[in-house]
Amino acid sequence: MGSLAEDTRWMDATAQAELVRSGQVSPTELLEAAIERIENLDPLLNAVVMRWFDHARDTAAAALPDGPFRGVPFLLKDLIATYAGQRLCNGNRALVQAAAPSAADSTVVARFRAAGLVTAGRTNTSEFGSLPTTEPAAWGPTRNPWDPTRSPGGSSGGSAAAVASGMVAIAHASDGGGSIRVPASCCGLVGLKPSQGRISAGPLGDESGLGVELGLSRTVRDTAALLDAVRGPGVGDAVAAPAPVRPYTRELDADPGSLRVGLLDHYPSGEPVHEQCATAVHEAGRLLEALGHRVEPGFPPALADPRYRAPIGVLRTVNIGATIAHLAEVLGREVTAADVEPVNWELARQARTVTAVDHARAQAGRARFRRAVHQWWADGFDLLLTPTIGEPPALLTDAAADDPAGQHARSGRTVSFTQPFNATGQPAITLPLHRTAHGLPIGVQLVAAHGHEAQLIRVASQLEQARPWADDPPVGDVPKSPSRAAFRSVASER
C-alpha cells in the first residue's frame, strides 16, 4: 500500500464514499489526498483554475449531509453553476478580473452539496462553453492526460482532465452541444447528457432547452448515482422529464432485454469518419450483438437533412449574443472586443443581425427537427449507436486566436454527432470502448428516446461488465488500490 493519495487515485466515487461510510477514512483525509494529486498533476494539465482548498477543508471538517457521496472530493466547472461565496468566471478574461462572489447556489450545486460532495475548486472551460476544446484566453489550455499535446475536448475539458488523470473521481460538467460527451470521448470517460428537463437549470441557467448539467466519471455506477442525486425539476422549470420508475442505480444490474439498435458509422452528411472511430462503432455493434441486441445500419433521416442545420445555428448564435449582453450588465459597462474572444465576439455580432421573426422561425425549425428525429424511435428503434466524435482527440491549437471562421468550421464538425440531441432533448451517453494503436481513447455514443436514461444505464452497465475500462488509466506508474480492481467483479477478455 502506498500513500492515501496513491491508494485512492483510481477508486471511483462510489468506492471512496464507502471508505467514508465504513469509517476507514475521514472526509478530510480523502480531501487532502485529492489536494495532493491536484498539486502534483495540475501544473502539467492546467485543469483546475480556481482552488478553494481552505474552504473545502472547512466543509470536510463540518457535519456533511449523509448523501450518497458523503466526503467525496469534487470539482465544479467554471460555467453556469453558481456556488455561494465563490466566483464564477465562465472562462472569460473580463470576469476573471471583475467577477464578484456568487450570492447563492444554483439548484444543481445545492443538490451536489446535499449529496455530500466536497467541492475543492473550479475546472477550466472554453469561454462561455462555446467551443468543443478547452483553450480559453482567460486560463490557458488544458492538456489531455493521455497525450499532453492534445486537447481534452470541451467545453468541460478541465473536468475531464481532472477525472481522467485521477485528481478526483467525479466532476461537474455541462452540455449545450456536446460539452459532456466530447471531453468524455477524448479522455476515456463515461459522459451522460441527460434528457431535457431531467435536471433543473434553475434559478438562472439555460432556459433554451439546449443545455443540461451532470458530470464526468470513470464508471457507469458513479454516473447513475450522481443522476439519482441531482435529478428532478425545480421551481418554475418550463420542462420536466418523466420521473424514473426506480433509482437509476437499480438499473445497473437490470436486464435491458433485446433492443433494436441503429448503427451510424459515418457523418450524417455521408462523409467518412476517421477509420479508428468507424472501427470503434463496429466493435461496439458486434459487442451489442454478442449481448443479445439486434444491430442494423440505420439512423434518423432528419440528421442528414441540411434544412435543419440553420435553425440550430441561429439559436446558438442568439444564445451567445444574450450571454454577452448579460456580461455587459455584470461589468456595468459596454463590452468591447478586448473583453471577449474573437469567435464569441463574431457570434455576438451575428446575433445582432437576427430579427425576432428569424428567432421565432428558428424555434419552429428546431421543433420540426425534434419531431422528425423522435419519429425514428417511435417507429421501432430503441437506441442509436454512433461515434461520439468523428476523429481522435485533436492537437491543441490556439482556440482564442483571431480565426472565427476556422473555429466555427472545426466546432461544427466536432459536434456533428452530439449537437443534434441537444436540439431534440434526448439523453445520450458516451462510453470509452476503444483505443487507437497509439493508446488514445475513442468514445462511442448511444442515444435513447426522451426520458429513457434508465435504458442507457442498463446497456452501458452491460457493456462495462463485458468490456471493463476503469482499470486502464492514462498512466501506469502509480499503484492502483486493490479495491479499485475489485469493485466490479467481471470476467472478460481484454
Image (tube, rainbow, N blue to C red):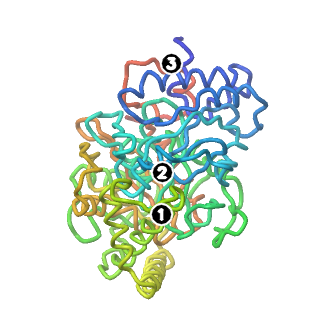
Mark nearer the N terminus (3 vs 1): 3
Toward which corner of the image does residue 132 lie, by quadrant? bottom left
Where does residue 276 sit, x and y in percent of width and height? 24, 49
Give the Cα distance between marks 3 and 1.
Answer: 41 Å
Which quarter of the rendering shows the C terminus?
top left
Toward which corner of the image does residue 347 lie, by quadrant? bottom left
Viewer-nearest of labels 3 and 1? 1
Q: Label 2 sits on what residue type?
A: Asn
Q: Which mark is residue 6?
A: 3
Q: Label 1 sits on what residue type?
A: Thr
Decide: few, some or many residues near mark 1? Use Cα within 10 Å; few <14, some 14-19, many ≥20.
some
Give the residue pinned by disc 2.
90
CB atoms of marks 3 and 1 within 8 Å: no
Give the residue pinned by disc 1.
323
Residue drawn where x is 33% and y is 41% of the image? 441
CB atoms of marks 3 and 2 within 8 Å: no
Q: Residue furthest front?
A: 333
Apparent side of residue 357 relative to residue 458 in the rendered image (left or right): left
Where does residue 389 sit, x and y in percent of width and height? 32, 55
Mark nearer the N terminus (1 vs 2): 2
Apparent side of residue 303 relative to residue 332 in the rendered image (left or right): left
Q: Label 3 sits on what residue type?
A: Glu
Q: Secondary structure at mark 3?
A: helix
Give the Cα distance between marks 1 and 2.
Answer: 10 Å
Give the Cα distance between marks 3 and 2.
Answer: 32 Å
Decide: is 6 above or below 307: above
Residue drawn where x is 55% and y is 43% of the image? 76
